[in-house]
Amino acid sequence: MADVARLNLTERGAEARLRSLMEDLIEAYAGNRPGYHLSLAVWFGKSVSSDLQHLLLLYSGPRLNHFVPDTVPLLWKTGSQGPPLVEVSATSVEHFSDLLASGANEVARFFEAPEILHFDKAFLSETILKTLNIVTEPPGLIKGWYVDADQAKTKTVKELLSSWGDSRPQVGLVKTWESPDSENCRGLIHFETNQRWVPLSLVGLRNFTFFNDLQAGKPGFLLFRGGSFYQVLKFEEKTAPGYSNLVLQRSSDDRYPEVYLRSVYPSEKPAL
Amino acid sequence: MTDTLKSICDQCTHLRNPHFDFIPSNSTRHREILVRDLQELLSAAAAENEKTVVILAGSILEGVLYSLIQGQSGYISQRRGTFEFNPDHSLQNYLSIFNKWLNHLTPSVVLPDSVVYYRDLVHINHEINSPHGVCAGASREMLRILDALLGGLSELTIPLSPGTSPGT
């Protein structure tokens, strides 16, 4: 067993080094096409021991209607021209989306042992994200914003939505319980880091105004896309191994701060 | 009414008494710049200048990550396979590198993507496309996040007792 473990470690080390060299190459490609934004890089047909690696690059910007091929030495930084080599296939996000939609055989090879080395979800379609299994948020996540009591007193939910609705969401919520009349619910507060929505720890909560306002006895509210409007009642930290099924990143000790919310949706009247 | 910026700073011990032991000893210029900027940040907070606090806190956050990642290039290289520090990277790049390769050393530190969004409020088009009053919440969060980061890094540099290893 010890020998097998050593072999695995050596292979893993080689793969990690190969991955880092591929990432460095991607970084170089990210900056060398003015007017284009590198939105996806997939290492496909992965074979660590091979002298030929394969990379798919998708760019946002002006449409390309074909794949632009390129072959580059992986050790380009050292000036080496020899193997291992990387065969690069680059095209636009739009063109790739069209090929996916038409079910073209041309794209099948990109899904052989693929590993996503870079993505920018803001520039990728749902189809591409789903096809490549790029999961950035847990099922049932709703996204929204913190509204303090001063804003809630003076604006209707409609006005709040029109003010916040187009801006980047600040918080996410995955409900863990909801009363039959939908008046009360509990859930796990999420935040976005490295493009993924993950649950906040109790320590992490302390950075956020909605938590500090509540600690100071000040009422605070969460407004979610679609118009749900809740008052934050309290946070309670729970040991709940089952919650790991609800989140993308499990807590190491299975402890999660759960928020208690009460619906205060006042239709078109002022929020308070 | 949420906390004033001054009252938040009063609670942020690491902003007021920062330890820059994570900066390599030969990087004195890095340290001087961060010390100066932190002093200016505290002045801006005392004056309740929300926009200034957002932008300056973002700049300091970038400076801290820049200095940390540069100083830990060898460690990242060991973990990653290879690593070369790029001084021209963006805050988003430094944030990703920290979250991927260094965050396990300071598990209490949470760096959300929103800090990049807030720092980018320096560009008028970003603020135009944000809700009115965005700087009020952003300034408070940036102060607390920066304080937590400096706190986490100050613990990172505490010498380990003989017989213990990182992560224990």
Image (spheres, coloured by chain):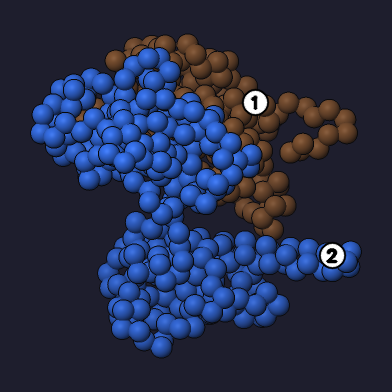
In the rendered view, does B138 fall on the left or right side of A50?
A: left
**Residue A115 rendering spot, x and y as whole percentages:** 55, 68
Which residue appears at 62% of the width and 81% of the height?
A: A52
The alpha-carbon separation of the residues under discs 1 and 2 comes to 36 Å
Q: Residue furthest front?
A: A180
Task: Give how far across and how far down residue A55 sits, in percent.
Answer: 51, 74
Q: Which residue appears farthest toward the bottom when viewing the image?
A: A105
Q: Residues within 10 Å of mark 1 (few under 14, many from 20)?
A: some
- Rendered image quadrant of residue B1: top left
Q: Residue at x 31, y 63 (%)?
A: A35
Q: Verify CB contact (< 8 Å) between mark 1 and mark 2.
A: no
Helix, strand or loop status at disc 2: helix
User: Which chain is represented by blue in the image?
Assistant: A
- Left/right placement of residue A48 relative to residue B17 reads right
Q: As shown in the figure, which amino acid type bears the numbered disc 2? A: Arg
Q: Is residue A208 above or below residue A56?
A: above
Q: Chain of mark 2?
A: A
SS at circle 1: helix
- At label 1, the amino acid type is Ser
Mark 2 — residue? Answer: A6
Quadrant of the image occupied by residue A208: top left
Residue B154 disc label: 1
Residue A127 is situated, as x and y percent measured from the top left of the image, at: 35, 69
Q: Whole-percent x and y of residue A180?
A: 31, 41
What residue lies at 28% left-to-right and 24% top-to-bottom?
A148
Q: Which chain is brown?
A: B
Rendered position, A46 above or below A238: below
